[in-house]
Image (cartoon, helix red, strand yellow):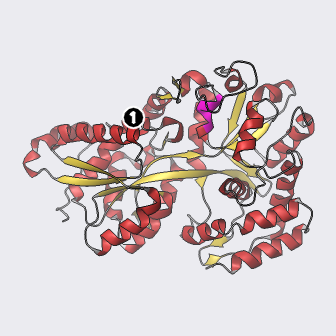
């Protein structure tokens, strides 16, 4: 049952105030999709620390992400929702619209912590009516990894735009010893969908608008198609996805790839199952030291660019004991935030950068967290500060198809249909020209509802 909402106190006084009011303590339920044993143990330890500080107990309940939507819908119908749900971006707006989430509670937390302490791109994705559907917690942005040593030697600019990538390809593409790029071309792989959405966003192209399907602009989409064909022609032949991208980059035979940040520990020789092979030492940090990254990428029709992001949120539900749930979420994003990020630092970038008094506090602490599997080291010891800054900065301009227009569900159906993958592959294989490809995309995507 929902308790009477009281104004949240400033975080500095919160722990003492909550302890003092322990007579009104609640037991709240927290659903989390971070169900791996080590990650679950970290969350239970954080819940225990919160309970000690506040008097509110937290029951941590693991839920498989593929079952999250079904379980939440059933619990809502039964009036038995948990108090807080850790959930991906795809549920934020639909659950707020359906009444599963309490946007007023999420907005209370964000305003109490300070909206200006959050990455603006992440907050924009949670925007709902006059507030926020859910509270952004963590996320990651897709990256272009490139051989900075080779770029520097050739006097090349970082590959922050279509044009910069194309210039670099002319200078560096020399197969088979060095491929300029390893583009995703395997149609039935979600990896290709993810990479393509990033490249489309970079040029400001989306198949959805406020009213649903929005026909693709032929000129802008042709720019996307031509660019993708260029990087595909600078790639090895065959059906390529994340595996070949990583393998060729790790062996020193690729100048650029697009990948998630989960490659960062492997790149530094910290995972035996995926070692760099650029030299004879699989634990070497040589390749990491020669690598640069780009998160915000732009096309000719969108000079501001965009970053493709995967985000997670703390949703406070409509059945919650609101005060205790707000206090738990606030604690998890303030006193306990470093522990929240420590669950998987390489894939949990700090959406909340710091506090009003220490604006970069959480970024600094996050960079000190150890990453890796077989060996561990902090990202800040493996990569220079400017690279850490670039990693985090992607969340400032994070985007996804359909989010700004309230059409994420439709955009997801379009992506999952793999129509974009199929048509782009036909175009880069020379089976159809650009006008036909745009017409085909509009026909197939327009039929999805």
- Secondary structure mostly seen in magenta is helix
x and y percentages locating residue 417 in the rendered image: 67, 69
Mark 1 neighbour density, 10 Å: few (under 14) some (14–19) many (20 or more)? many
Instruction: Name the residue rendered at 79%, 29% in the picture.
Output: 252
Q: Is residue 119 left or right of residue 411?
A: left
Instruction: Name the residue rendered at 33%, 43% in the picture.
Output: 332
x and y percentages locating residue 248 in the rendered image: 78, 36
In the picture shown, does residue 409 fall above or below 21?
below
Q: Examine the image and state in which quarter residue 317 appears.
A: bottom left
In the picture shown, does residue 206 fall above or below 369?
below
In the picture shown, does residue 26 fall above or below 218?
above
Between 307 and 33, the one lying in front of the other is 33
Res 356 visible: no
The mark total stands at 1
Q: Examine the image and state in which quarter residue 424 appears.
A: bottom right
Q: In this view, does 441 lie to the left or right of 270?
A: right
In the picture shown, does residue 108 fall above or below 256?
below
Residue that mark 1 sits on: 338
Instruction: Name the residue rendered at 31%, 75% in the picture.
Output: 77
Q: Is residue 173 left or right of residue 130?
A: right
User: Where, quadrant-wise, is the C terminus in this rendering?
Assistant: bottom right
């Amino acid at each position: 049952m929902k308790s009477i909402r009281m104004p949240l106190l400033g975080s500095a006084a919160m722990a003492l105030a909550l302890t003092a009011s322990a007579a009104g303590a609640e037991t709240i339920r927290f659903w989390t999709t971070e169900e791996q044993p080590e990650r679950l143990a970290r969350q239970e330890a954080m819940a225990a620390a919160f309970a000690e500080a506040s008097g509110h107990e937290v029951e941590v309940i693991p839920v498989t992400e593929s079952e999250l939507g079904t379980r939440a819908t059933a619990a809502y119908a039964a009036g038995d929702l948990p108090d807080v749900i850790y959930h991906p971006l795809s549920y934020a707006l639909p659950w707020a619209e359906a009444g599963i989430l309490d946007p007023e509670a999420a907005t209370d937390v964000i305003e109490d912590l300070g909206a200006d302490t959050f990455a603006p791109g992440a907050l924009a994705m949670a925007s709902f009516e006059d507030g926020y559907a859910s509270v952004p917690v963590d996320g990651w942005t897709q990256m272009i990894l490139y051989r900075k040593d080779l770029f520097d030697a050739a006097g090349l600019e970082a590959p922050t735009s279509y044009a910069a990538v194309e210039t670099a390809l002319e200078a560096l593409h020399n197969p088979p010893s060095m491929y300029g790029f390893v583009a995703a071309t395997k149609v039935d792989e979600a990896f290709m969908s993810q990479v393509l959405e990033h490249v489309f966003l970079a040029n400001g192209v989306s198949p959805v608008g406020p009213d649903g399907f929005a026909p693709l602009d032929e000129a802008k989409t042709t720019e996307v198609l031509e660019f993708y064909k260029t990087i595909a022609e600078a790639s090895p032949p065959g059906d390529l996805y994340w595996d070949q991208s990583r393998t060729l980059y790790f062996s020193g035979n690729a100048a650029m790839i697009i990948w998630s940040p989960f490659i960062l520990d492997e790149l530094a020789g910290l995972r035996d199952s995926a070692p760099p092979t650029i030299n004879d030492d699989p634990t070497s940090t040589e390749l990491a030291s020669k690598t640069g990254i780009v998160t915000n990428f732009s096309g000719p029709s969108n000079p501001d660019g965009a970053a493709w992001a995967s985000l997670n949120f703390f949703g406070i539900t409509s059945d919650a004991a609101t005060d205790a749930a707000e206090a738990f979420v606030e604690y998890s994003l303030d006193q306990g935030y470093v522990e929240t990020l420590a669950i998987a630092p390489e894939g949990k970038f700090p959406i909340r950068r710091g506090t009003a008094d220490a604006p970069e506090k959480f970024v600094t602490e996050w960079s000190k967290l150890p990453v890796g599997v077989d060996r561990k080291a902090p990202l800040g010891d493996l990569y220079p500060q400017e690279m850490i800054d670039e990693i985090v900065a992607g969340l400032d301009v994070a985007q996804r198809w359909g989010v700004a227009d309230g059409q994420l569900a439709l955009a997801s159906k379009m992506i999952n249909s793999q129509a974009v993958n199929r048509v782009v592959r036909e175009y880069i294989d020379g089976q159809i020209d650009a006008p036909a490809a745009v017409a085909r995309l509009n026909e197939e995507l327009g039929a999805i509802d």
